[in-house]
Amino acid sequence: MTTIPQTTMSGATAPTGLGATPMVSDSCQITVPDYSVLRDQNIKKINDYYNTLLSSYTKNYSDYSKQLTSNNVNDRTYASTTLKPKVSDYNSQIINLSQTMINNVNQDNDLISAQKNELTSKMAKIDSIMANIKLLKDKDNEMSILTNARQDSLNSTKTGAEDMQFTTYIYIGISILLVLLIIGLIMYLVYSNYKTPTKINNNLYKNIATNN
């Protein structure tokens, strides 16, 4: 906020509150002022104050120069005792005003530079965050693809296992049927062999009895 020294000789009022203070309403909502309007108003105040100082300085210096070279002793005395301090005071105020404005410009430049550096730092952080988000999205997509591939592989393995289990059951069933068939065939052969000698022996006995 710019503060201009108060004048002590000219009677002109120096602008003191050049900063902008946001207005707060009863509803606690902050109303942001129009800074372009405030800037123009502040510039006008500074120019008016500077012109008032310059006009007073010019007039008093002109009077001082004339009366200092006057043939009248009272005029020269008035010039040395009254006008000279006034001219010196106005000159000091003009210098102070110029120095204050230079300091404010330098301060504004420093603030702008600091804000620029802060903005650059924040932009770098935002870029880093966005890069991390993109990396996470890419990894998430990769994980989704990998998960889907694993799920497809698991489903394929599960289907293959079910098919293999079904085929195994069929082979087991066929093996059991073959075993039963072989057992039946063996039993049939054993039973057939058992009946055939008995029948031969009976026929032999009948032939012997007939011969006798």
Image (spheres, helix red, strand yellow):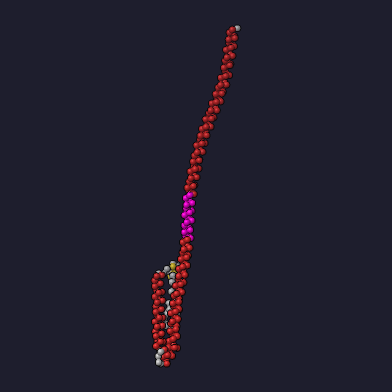
Q: Residue at x 48, y 58 (%)?
A: 128
Q: Quadrant of residue 29?
A: bottom left
Residue 131 highlighted magenta (yes or no): yes
Measured as percent of width and height from the top left, residue 63 is found at 40, 87
Q: Nearer the viewer, residue 107 or 186?
A: 107
Mainly helix, strand or loop, the magenta region?
Answer: helix
| Image height of 65 relative to 111, above or below | below
Q: Quadrant of residue 195?
A: top right
| Image height of 57 relative to 162, above or below | below
Q: Taking the image as drawn, is residue 26 in sight?
A: no
| Image height of 28 relative to 208, above or below | below
Residue 24 highlighted magenta (yes or no): no
Q: Residue at x 45, y 81 (%)?
A: 92
User: Which quadrant is the C terminus positioned in?
Assistant: top right
Q: Quadrant of residue 91?
A: bottom left
Counting every numbered tag in the picture gives 0
Measured as percent of width and height from the top left, residue 15 is found at 43, 77
Q: Residue at x 52, y 32 (%)?
A: 171
Measured as percent of width and height from the top left, residue 97 is found at 44, 78
| Image height of 41 relative to 150, above or below | below
Numbered range of the magenta stretch: 125-142
Measured as percent of width and height from the top left, residue 104 is found at 45, 73
